[in-house]
Each structure stands twice: as C-alpha cells, then as structure tokens.
Amino acid sequence: MLIFTLCGSGWLEIVLKTGVLRRLKRAALSIFPISTCFLIWDGYAIAQGHWFFDRSQILGIYGPFSIPLEEYLFFIVVPLAAILTLEGITTVKPHWRKREFGE
Amino acid sequence: MIYSDIAIAAFGIAVMADLFLFKNSMLTRPAFWSSYAIILPFQLLTNWWLTSRNIVMYSPDAIMGIRICSAPIEDLLFGFALVLSVMGMWEYWGRRGVQRY
C-alpha cells in the first residue's frame, strides 16, 4: 500500500517537475508537526485497542509506543503524496497558484 | 474517548485551524478541492485494501459501525484532517518564504 502510494504520486515529481523533493526542508516542516499529532493518536488508539494489526501481514518491526514501522512510514508517505498532488495540480493549473502567497 | 470521537475532533480542529488560524484558507480554494477529489478515490482504494484483507482491524466498540469500501467512515474524517492540515502547513511555510520555489 505504501509502495502503491509512492508510485501513484511520485511520478508527479518526475513528469511535472513539482520540485517537492527538492524542497525537503519545507516538506519536513509541513509533515513533521502534523504527523507527530497523528502518531500520538495512533499510539493511543493502539494502547486502547481501538485498532490492531494482523501480525502476519506486517513487517513486525515496532518503533516507540509499540507503533509498527509501517505506521511511521504511512505518516511520511501519505502527507508527501498529498503535497505532491497539490503541487501537481498547481503546476497544471498555474492560475490557481496566484492566490497561494496572497499576491 | 473512542476512535470516532477523536476522528471527529481531528476533523473539527483541522477545519477550524484552516479557516481561522491560517491566512488564505485552503478550504476556499479550487486547488485544494481538486487535489482532494484526486486523493479521495485513492484513499478509498487503499482503505479497502487494508481493511478487507484484515491487515488493520477495528474494535467494534471504538467505531460507529458505518463502513465505506469496507473501512470505517471515521477514516474519511481522519484522512481529510491529515491532508488538509499538511497542505495548510505547506502553504504556510511557502508564505513565510521557506523554499518557495
């Protein structure tokens, strides 16, 4: 699923030259604070038993707060795909970008 | 709090932050809604994959029980909140002049 998401959005970077991966600092500053909040929720939901994972279908590597590695990757890959989609859209439709910086 | 409460709260916080905290709200812009229209089918597809194969399972006590493409409806709220807040942050740093181009 993570590889599918990477491929599904990654081509935008190459074909449309969205330049998101070139702007790693801005991407990291956008993803890190938000993903931290969601991972806290994730850890809480796991601890409370709100959801659980099939141990035979995950890698079995756990990070802090017994959150599976896949979940940490999810909260990097999915937000990155969202940014790539947004930048892909505004690359194709540049007039939608005008209001981006309030200019 | 159960899963539903947190999903609804996350959705509410993301929408409120976008409308009142950030300048130049994402929710009023066609670029956001067009992106979301592309992301939503993919989310439904991956949600379906992860839940129909029981890779991820939910406690029946923690969710409302309404399912779309085999995944709890709460996950659409969660996905919306995630996508909206990350895009909001991306635009925020752009306005602040961080790696604008």
Image (cartoon, rainbow, N blue to C red):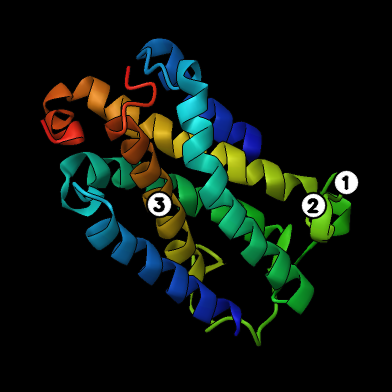
Instruction: In this rendered view, identify the residue nearer to me: A24 or B43.
Output: A24
Q: Chain of mark 1?
A: A
Q: Amino acid at mark 2?
A: Pro
Give neighbour class at mark 1: few <14, some 14-19, many 20+ (Cα, 10 Å): few
Instruction: In this rendered view, identify the residue nearer to me: B18 or B69.
Output: B18
Residue A55 visible in image: yes
Q: Which residue is mark 1?
A: A61
Q: Residue at x 50, y 20 (%)?
A: A21
Circle 1 SS class: loop
Q: Amino acid at mark 1?
A: Ile
Q: Position of residue B76 (x, y in %)?
A: 44, 63
Q: Position of residue A77 (x, y in %)?
A: 58, 37
Q: Do the CB atoms of the residues marked 2 and 1 lie less than 8 Å apart?
A: yes
Q: CA distance from mark 1 to mark 3?
A: 28 Å
| Label annotation for residue A26 | none
| Label annotation for residue B85 | 3
